[in-house]
Image (tube, grey):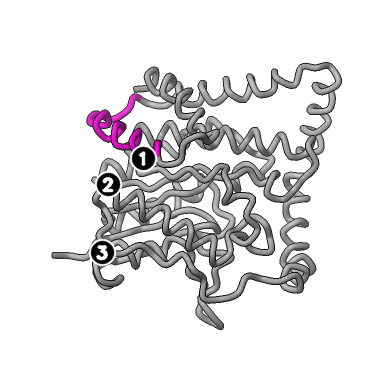
Amino acid sequence: MRPVRFVALGDSLTEGVGDPAGAGAGRRGWAARLAGALAAGDAQGVEFTNLAVSGAQTRDVLHRQTPAGLALRPDLASVVVGVNDTLRSTFDIRAVAARLDQVYGAFSGRGATLLTACLPDPGAMLGLPGALARPLARRQRAVNDVVHALSDRYGAVHLHLSEGAWVADRALWSADRLHPGERGHRQLAVRFHALLAEAGLATGPPPSPEPRSPAPGRSANLWWLATAGTGWVARRCTDLLPQLLWLAAGELRHDARGTGARLDLCAAAAVSEALAALPAAPKGTGAQRRRTATNRTAVPGTACAAAGRSAARTTAITG
């Protein structure tokens, strides 16, 4: 029997930022930890390739990572991306939906099982003030709505990560507040493994949730802020900050008029239009969609679950 082929696509989260493998050994990350638990025994029964790159947006996954991933003929393909799109002044939910639809469709069409996730909004993770955080939260909700709808469409094994106790647990996050630490990456691997095992797609024992390295202390956090953190902020300031300030000013104007709900309605309408503009769903996705609905019950009560109910109405139009 040939090994299970697992290909991981995405950005820094999947690349493994926050989960160093040791001095000079690069990073591990949730996907690498999951790979070792897919087959009984150890990772020898799995051929794992991590194509994720820090800073990647949906266009990078579509045009660069997807062709390389398809060439490997994977049995399992994880696609976790979208946060970097929300942090750019060029953010366009219609373009995000079109790109993800092509990526999901390409792997699903080759018979690969898709692994997807909705994610927390970066504004909340960074602790930004309300007027600055709300536009980013609205963007991330839009991306999550699209990911959820397309996960249903293509029968993906979908994990809800947009909110919950794990988001607020600082022990799970690295110094930058945007990437999980070792414990957080292990937690993601455990949760993905549970869904795959439930679907009969993982036969190995679950990854260990306990880290081997201590969580970064206050000095490590301060060092990151003084070095890599300042560079990250500077890069975002030249791109996102001017637009974010403009969006924040709009938030304040709507707050003063009591019309803030209109912004949410406009964002929801943009998601519906983005999904309605997609080509018709491929044949044979109905049974897969039922499988995803089962996975959705794994984490009840999330905002993503509510998005799924809205998305179900939209996919009826597009499919």
Residue type, mark 3 in image: Ala
Where does the N terminus fall, quadrant-wise? bottom left
Q: CA distance from mark 2 to mark 3?
A: 14 Å
Residue located beneath label 3 in the image: 39
Residue 308 at what x, y percent from top left? 46, 29
Residue located beneath label 1 in the image: 295
Q: How many marks?
A: 3
Where does the C terminus fall, quadrant-wise? top left
User: Is residue 282 shown in magenta?
Assistant: yes
Could you say which disc has been placed on residue 199 in the image?
Answer: 2
Q: Secondary structure at mark 2?
A: loop
Which residue occupies the extreme left position in the image? 1
Q: Earlier in the sequence, mark 2 or mark 3?
A: 3
Answer left or right for 271 relative to 89.
left
Q: CA distance from mark 1 to mark 2?
A: 9 Å
- 170 in relation to 300, above or below: below
Q: Secondary structure at mark 3?
A: loop
- 132 in relation to 112, above or below: above
Residue type, mark 2 in image: Ala
Residue type, mark 1 in image: Asn
Q: Which residues are magenta?
A: 280-297
